[in-house]
Image (cartoon, rainbow, N blue to C red):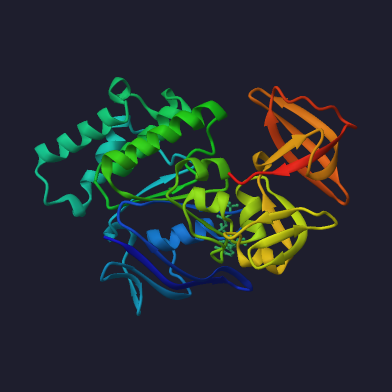
């Protein structure tokens, strides 16, 4: 089943939180909604979940209208599970009682008691919660609590899982291991996941497609957005990006004040209109001699496998990630050579 958003607009007084969003979310897809604070991510999730009625537009699951055309299907009748950043657990309920809770919904009345127990056991087992099933939230770590939220969300086997910054309350290392847990949930359940985050690396690591801003800035796979951004905002929001200035001639780009030509058949029109060529930090190589953009090293930061350099090129400061065997010192004059990845 696919979820369709058609012309979804949400106004709060003067604030336009969502502006004419059109989107098809395919069955089984992992869609990350990425964007800076205040861009409307939570508002979009709330509209899909049925917590808020969009000012305009229609949301439908295949042919079933969830909201629009004067209809508004309540939260509990939508085929959804939800996981929030704040865990939303009850202090006086055990792990098992949390996971049992959705099974009490009228939506599950077609199941026998034995089938319900089987579903609860499976969700607890799959989330690695068996040893903790009789504990209360106050007796669990942050990661274990988020596993309880996940178990509670998946126990009813919803077609869609909504996740609102589910990892933001966890520390850096736990975030990485919980990413794997969420990817496992995706594989295991086959559910569509709509995942809101402002963390670029999280979205790039996990998503099938990324959507940005109250207006859709770009929809694409992480690779497409990383390597073929459609706008300057999309390019620099997902990761660092250098914008080389120059002139475009069809698919060829002449670097300003240099006799250097870059071939860029896939570079988006927005960059061409602005006389820019986007270059990721690892697509530039630093050389001492040769044909490249002259630059001066201004800063170097060692980061294990690579060194992050800042370089001054005329008015611009560029970032380059180089192997840790390539050593350049601040003040050194070098050349930057572009190599498409
Ligand atoms: P964050 O990452 O900070 O949670 P977000 O992208 O989820 O941000 P939203 O919470 O969706 O952003 O808010 C989008 C805009 O709508 C913001 O300008 C916010 O102030 C406004 N907004 C959200 N809910 C309401 C409300 N109930 N009443 C008035 N304005 C609201």
Closer-to-camera residue (51/143): 143
Of residues 121 and 26, the one nearer the viewer is: 26
- Residue 83 image point, x, y percent: 40, 44
Q: Is residue 24 left or right of residue 107?
A: right
Furthest toward the top, the residue is: 131
Residue, x 60% and y 73% (percent of image)? 13
Residue 54 or residue 220, whichever sits in front: 220
| Above or below 280: residue 264 | below
The quadrant where residue 172 appears: top right
Q: Quadrant of residue 186?
A: top left
**Quadrant location, ligand no. 1:** bottom right
Q: Is residue 132 above or below residue 74?
A: above
Residue 11 or 233: which is nearer the viewer? 233
Residue at image position (69%, 24%) is: 324
- Residue located at (84% from left, 42% from top): 295
Furthest residue in direction bottom, as rendered: 69
Residue 294, percent from left and from top: 84, 44
On screen, residue 103 versus residue 273, left or right, reads: left
Q: Quadrant of the N terminus?
A: bottom left
């Amino acid at each position: 089943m696919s979820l369709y958003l058609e012309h979804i607009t949400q106004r709060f007084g003067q604030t336009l939180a969502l502006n004419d969003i059109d989107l098809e979310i395919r069955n089984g897809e992992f869609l990350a909604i990425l964007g800076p604070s205040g861009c409307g991510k939570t508002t979009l999730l709330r509209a899909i979940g049925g917590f808020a009625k969009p000012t305009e537009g229609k949301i439908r699951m295949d042919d079933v209208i969830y909201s629009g055309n004067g209809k508004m299907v309540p939260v509990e009748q939508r085929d959804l599970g939800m996981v929030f950043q704040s865990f939303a657990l009850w202090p006086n309920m055990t792990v098992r009682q949390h996971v049992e809770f959705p099974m009490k919904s009228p939506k599950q009345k077609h199941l026998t008691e034995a089938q319900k127990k089987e579903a609860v056991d499976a969700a607890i087992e799959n989330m690695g919660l068996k040893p903790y099933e009789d504990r209360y939230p106050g007796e669990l770590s942050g990661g274990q609590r988020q596993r309880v939220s996940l178990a509670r969300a998946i126990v009813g086997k919803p077609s869609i899982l909504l996740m609102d910054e589910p990892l933001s309350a966890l520390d850096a290392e736990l975030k990485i291991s919980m990413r794997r847990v969420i990817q496992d949930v995706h594989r295991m359940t086959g559910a569509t996941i709509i995942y809101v985050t402002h963390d670029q690396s999280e979205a790039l690591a996990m998503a099938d497609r990324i959507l940005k801003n109250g207006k859709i800035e770009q929809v694409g796979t992480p690779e497409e957005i990383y390597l073929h951004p459609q706008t300057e905002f999309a390019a620099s929001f997902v990761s660092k990006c250098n914008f080389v200035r120059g002139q475009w001639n069809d698919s060829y780009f002449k670097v300003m004040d240099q006799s250097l030509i870059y071939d860029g058949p896939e570079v988006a029109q927005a960059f061409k209109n602005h006389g820019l060529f986007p270059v990721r930090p690892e697509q530039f190589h630093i050389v001492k001699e040769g044909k490249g953009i002259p630059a001066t090293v201004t800063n170097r930061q060692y980061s294990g496998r690579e060194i992050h350099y800042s370089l001054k090129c005329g008015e611009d400061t560029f970032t380059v990630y180089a192997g840790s065997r390539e050593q350049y010192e601040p003040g050194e004059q070098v050349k930057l050579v572009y190599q498409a990845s």
